[in-house]
Amino acid sequence: MAIIIKSEREIGLIRESCRMLEKVHDELSKIIRPGISTLEIDKTGEELIRSFGGVPNFLHYNGYPASICVSVNEEVVHGIPKKDRILKEGDIVSLDAGMMLKGYHSDAARTYAVGKVTPEVGCLIEATKQSFFEGIRYAKEGYHLFDISNAIAGYIKPFGYGIVRDLTGHGVGTELHEDPPVPNFRQLTRGPKLRRGMTLAIEPMINLGTWKVRWLDDDWTVVSADGSYSAHYENTVLITDGEPEILTLSGGL
Ligand code: MF3
Ligand code: CO
């Protein structure tokens, strides 16, 4: 496994791509409401990406047919946007978006409540987001990759939620998915050493019920095996010798 260390020039370009992607997410957050279709979210996202000079990197990736992965309720990730999938009060929706700008990728995901959701589901969304922040306490030179994984898993454990194991985070750069895989569940070793200049997408996917997932017949949509709600939170992060730089979250939390 070769983990690419980015040069200052490359870091600058990834940072730019990530800043623009953050703006895409900020704009998309404003249109989430009961009555909107998942296809409208995708179309708006694609327009935003292009308006910032980027290219939607998910579109046609291994044949994926859209620019934004829109996953509702028990859908974990890679939901395919549809005209007739309409969000309703009480749903939760995960938007996973990526773009390529000047040859460099960015990748980030957010989960939103649509109107009012049950306290149980609200807690799932919050804990999933918080697990990312627990993980990145170790996203620094001097720690090891799986320190991040174990911090995420350790934070989630007392909630009794299922941590998805079939999908992981990953390196990001001139490719959307680079080495190393970044698991969110407990690891028995500490894994490779983290070094400044690594750029990683860290993305916990957490289910209210079982950790087990299955794929729908569309061969894309990943759903929780027991139909329980699932949340996803992701940012592209730069490893430094100090605090990590959350490249897709410049404006704070
Ligand atoms: N954002 C996803 C990830 O983090 C990748 C989506 S690829 C697509 O790995 F083809 F499904 F869009
Ligand atoms: Co990702």
Image (spheres, rainbow, N blue to C red):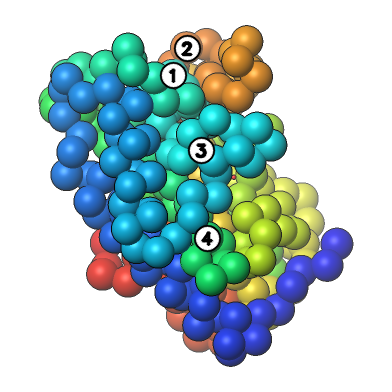
**Depth-wise, is mark 4 or mark 1 nearer the camera?**
4
Q: Which residue is mark 3?
A: 205
The answer to whether residue 140 is seen in the rendering is no
Residue 14 x %, y % = 52, 72
Crowd band around label 4 with a 10 angstrom C-alpha radius: few (<14), some (14–19), many (20+):
many
Q: Nearer the viewer, residue 116 or 32?
A: 32
- The amino acid beneath tag 3 is Met
Q: Which residue is mark 4?
A: 100
Residue for point 30% across, 34% down? 41
Which mark is on residue 227?
2
* Labels 1 and 3: the sequence-earlier one: 1
- The amino acid beneath tag 4 is Met
Which mark is on residue 74?
1
Q: How far apart, in angstroms, are the residues tagged by discs 2 and 4? A: 33 Å
In this view, the residue farthest toward the right is 1
Q: How far apart, in angstroms, are the residues tagged by discs 4 and 3? A: 23 Å
Residue 130 x %, y % = 37, 51
